[in-house]
Amino acid sequence: MKITRKNEPLTTNGQPPVVGEKLPDFEVEKADGSVVKMANLITKPTLISVVPNINTSVCSISTKRFNGEVDKYEGIDFYTVSTNTPEEQKDWCAAEGVAKMELLSDEQLDFGKKMGLYIESAGVDSRSIWIVDGNHEVIYQELIQEMTNEPNYSAALAFLDNLK
């Protein structure tokens, strides 16, 4: 997939799943260091916000924004996936007061590579928003074409509103 960062062209390692397709069986790391498979992580409707690096401004802004929305959506899980280590994510959460949004580490790059989101030249995953159902099927996606742009929060949250 072709994207840009500050208008410089970048390419991901593949084509991400589209609406109607199932997510690949990826693994990510939780804050406690345990590795969890997608099948055990997603058991109900879930919003996954993918950010390249939690320690950059746009990634921080989007994670804090979704963290502020979590309580409004009963029965829906919210996760942020970044290529940061679990320790970096914990430090960021402590510094920013983020306690509701669960951060998951793709430090091993399994998620990004299997999702077609990994940008080898940058060593990070491409910014995107995913909403999947309890059967792991993609029901909403936003692939952000310019990595320095924020996602369309209103569209993703409106989609969740319609799931209620």
Image (spheres, rainbow, N blue to C red):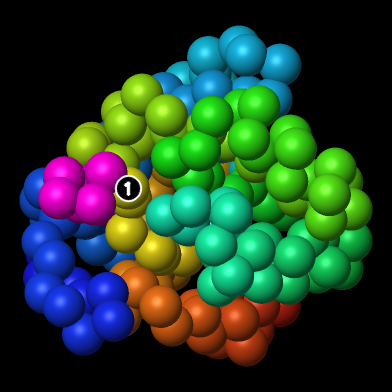
For label 1, the residue is: 124
Q: Quadrant of residue 128?
A: bottom left
What quarter of the picture does the C terminus occupy?
bottom right
The answer to if 59 sits in the magenta stretch is no
- Residue at 73% from the left image edge and 46% from the top image edge: 92
- Which of the 4 image quarters holds residue 88? top right
Residue 153: which quarter of the image? bottom right
Say which amino acid is labelled 1: Val
Q: Position of residue 29 (x, y in %)?
A: 54, 23
Residue drawn at x 36%, y 24% is 108
- The part of the chain drawn in magenta is 116-123
Question: Closest to the observer: 81 or 5?
Answer: 5
Question: Residue 132, position in %: x, y?
Answer: 48, 53
Q: Nearer the viewer, residue 123 or 103?
A: 123
Q: How many residues crowd mark 1 within 10 Å: few (<14), some (14–19), many (20+)?
A: many
Helix, strand or loop for disc 1: strand
Q: Is residue 113 above or below residue 117?
A: above
- Residue at 22% x, 37% y: name it: 113
Side of 95 where 114 appears, left or right = left
